[in-house]
Image: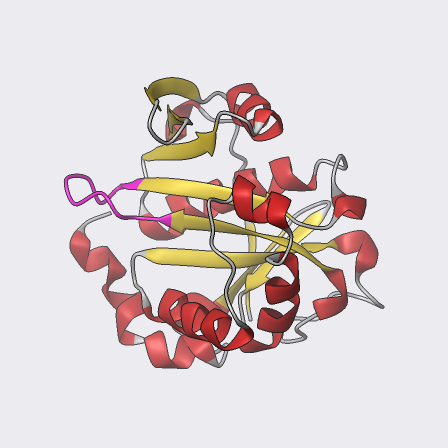
Amino acid sequence: MEVSGAAPAAAAAVEAESGSGGKGSWYVLGERAVLVPYLREHVPRYHEWMQDPALLEATASEPLSLAQEFDVHRSWTLDPLKHTFIVLDKELIEGRFSPGNRHTEAMVGDVNIYMNDPDDMQLAEIEIMIAEHKSRGKGIGQEAILLMMAFAVEKYGIHTFRAKISESNTASLKLFRKLGFKDASYSAVFKEVTLEAPADALPLRFPLTIGDW
């Protein structure tokens, strides 16, 4: 992605918070998961997840107050170099999936990309968190990663993906290696493995089912 490729998201940042335009304007439909915009209505549930010490350790995060969590949500929404989706478990959706419905009852995690390498704006760091134990082991995390990466290729022109994972997070390391990521480096200081994969070497499926939120 050229730097100018982020301009539409930046120009529509204010609208994105309300779910209309910019980063808040899309959802992505999969077989097991649905990716939806991260909205203010999702923040309280997300905040509950991030009180779990295990999730804080896995995501290298610090505990925040609810007010701080809303501030972080706003900053993510306004940042043109980040894109966050909330992951819904389709089996937990009450009734049928409806664009525009927050479906907080089916929230199980989130997936993010960060285009934060100034030397290559077409490289994106990707993160996945499945917070709800009842939705782990169902293939939702793998599908959410693949959906997000295909979305990033289609909407942002990303050609390379990077993941930074704690060496203690063996499940995530196994998942990303299974998808085709290769170890690129290791930080002894942070006890973290960096993995990378070119987009054209990943099992991405097109066309995506993307809809207007």
The correct choice, above or below, for 164 with respect to 116 in the image is above
Residue drawn at (41%, 48%) of the image? 113
Q: Residue furthest left?
A: 119
Residue 80 is left or right of residue 22, and the answer is: left
Of residue 38 and residue 166, the one placed in the foreground of this image is 166
Does residue 59 belong to the magenta stretch? no
The correct choice, above or below, for 144 with respect to 210 in the image is above
Residue 117 point in image, percent of width and height: 22, 43
The correct choice, above or below, for 140 with respect to 88 in the image is above
Q: Is residue 147 something that shows in the picture? A: no
Of residue 47 and residue 13, the one placed in the foreground of this image is 47
Residue 56 point in image, percent of width and height: 55, 48
Q: Is residue 152 something that shows in the picture? A: yes
Residue drawn at (31%, 65%) of the image? 79
Residue 162 is left or right of residue 47, and the answer is: left
Q: Which residues are magenta?
A: 114-123
Report the colour scheme: secondary structure
Of residue 43 and residue 199, the one placed in the foreground of this image is 43
Secondary structure mainly formed by the magenta segment: loop
Screen quadrant of the C terminus: bottom right
Residue 50 point in image, percent of width and height: 59, 57
Quarter occupied by residue 137: top right
Residue drawn at (47%, 55%) of the image? 62
Residue 151 point in image, percent of width and height: 46, 48
Residue 11 is left or right of residue 204, and the answer is: left
Of residue 91 and residue 107, the one placed in the foreground of this image is 107
